[in-house]
Amino acid sequence: MKFKNTHKDHEVTDESIYRQRRQLVKTGIIGMGTLAINPSLALTLGQPQKNTSFNIEDTTSEKDATTYNNFYEFGLGKDEPAENAHTLATNSWTIEVSGHAKKTGIFDLEKIVKQMSLEERIYRMRCVEAWSMVIPWLGFKLADLIKYFEPTSQAKYIYFETLYDPTQMPGQKSRSIPWPYREGLRMDEAMNELTLVTVGMYGKILPNQNGAPLRLIVPWKYGFKGIKSIKKIAFVDKQPLNSWQAIAPQEYGFFANVNPNVDHPRWSQKTERRITGSFSFFRSRIDTQLFNGYGAYVADLYHGMNLTKYY
Amino acid sequence: MKNIFVFKLSVFILCLIPLGLGLWDGMSHQLTADPIEEILHRTGIWAFRLLLVTLLMTPLKVLTGWIHWIRIRRLLGLFTFFYATLHLTTYVWLDIQLNWPQFLEDIIKRPYITVGMVAWFIMLPMAITSNRYMIKKLGKHWKPLHRLIYMVVILACFHFLWLVKSDLTEPLIYTAIGLSLLLFRLIQNHHDKKS
């Protein structure tokens, strides 16, 4: 797997850090128990920060990334998922696959993961609320998972659903949003090499509050596209209605591509507060990049499309 | 007289607690992963709370018959303005980093920021004219000016309602309390005219 190198020299992680990360992945793998993974395919992606007047782009601390979460299934406060998500039972997790595919039915997650090649990738994560993090994920390409299910030519979109179980997800007892959480991607977006299904972060298995046991990561889109604790997948021929679009269609669309030129109706998307270890009160904002800086990989997907209309 | 002083001093110290806790949490890195957002939220919510407490003094006086509630009203009003000013400063300085074009765009394009800004500008002359000298100087104009606080409550409710992402529970609770306090005055006014 080759990625186009668009990063300047100083932006690329230096080797010692890279080696540490490799070590992290290896130790992580031991910790992951039954998840058999191939570390040799791990790669790092993305350290670019063009605006050097702000702090050097560094990884968000594990503590911040695992205690500051939007996961309404466990409460609306950012600190609530970390406090409440222990009730989620992630062992012997199954996924229900349906729709236009040759292989459908109930699948054992562990068996699927064994057949996927896991890699570590460091991605920027831009929340629609105008804050962002930089997180090392462990996962596999969604494209590989899709190929596994052998979708037919009628499959134009892929649809995802989070687990619905108010006993495990106490936030679902309140009607803050319609449950279960739903998301979707156009098939070409889903097949893009950047789109990941992640099962870990920071070299460890995914914590419950971050969407265990498996979640989607689509780094050029706003964070809410990254549906957590996926329970159902369907191959469909029509564009699915994702949760935030259903809640407020004038504010959130299906595509949700990170775009500094298209503001949220109630706040600007031009800049973002980057949450990193080297946080400073006086250099807290950086410029938001089109497609979150991943344009080289994904801009072609939207060739000729009006991104203001299809936000 | 001495008791009133102790009463006022206690309220003064109580009003400083949110600031003290904020500073403590800031120094011990307890302001979540996104400290600026947390400071914005804390200063904003305390300005709103103190605004409601300020407006509670007249109903308390009427309902309890203890007239001294009124004695802490100015203090509470000034603390409301103090936290609102911290809130505004956090937004302009720490959040948008003194980006003035962005500031103007926000005021024009984003209704929740527009109403928040208007609310602060209404409170500014009220804070300036809250001393004895200005009360005398303004005479009969003082009261109408300070009645604008009712406007501030309504603006604060909209500010809160329009900024949340999905769950309206919390801003609706504040709005309900704010409206009850205004309603109390309407009823009271009606009652006074009758008698």
Image (cartoon, grey):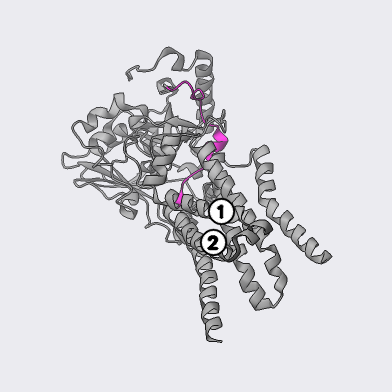
Q: Is residue B190 above or below residue A35?
A: below
Nearest to the observer: residue B183 or residue A208: B183
Q: Secondary structure at mark 2?
A: helix
Residue at mark 2 to residue at mark 1: CA–CA distance: 8 Å
Q: What residue is drawn where x is 45% and y is 51%?
A: A72
Nearest to the observer: residue A226 or residue B151: B151
Mark 2 vs 1: CB contact within 8 A: yes
The answer to whether residue A33 of the structure is visible from this angle is: no
**SS assignment for the magenta stretch, majority:** loop
Which image quarter holds the N terminus of chain B? Answer: bottom right
Q: Secondary structure at mark 1?
A: helix
Q: Amino acid at mark 1?
A: Pro
Q: Position of residue A172 (x, y in %)?
A: 44, 58
Q: Is residue A70 above or below residue A169?
A: above
Magenta extent = A51-72
Residue marked by disc 1 = B125
Residue count near mark 2 (Cα–Cα under 10 Å), binned few <14, some 14–19, many ≥20? some
Residue marked by disc 2 = B145
Q: Position of residue A302 (x, y in %)?
A: 23, 33
Residue A44, label in figure: none
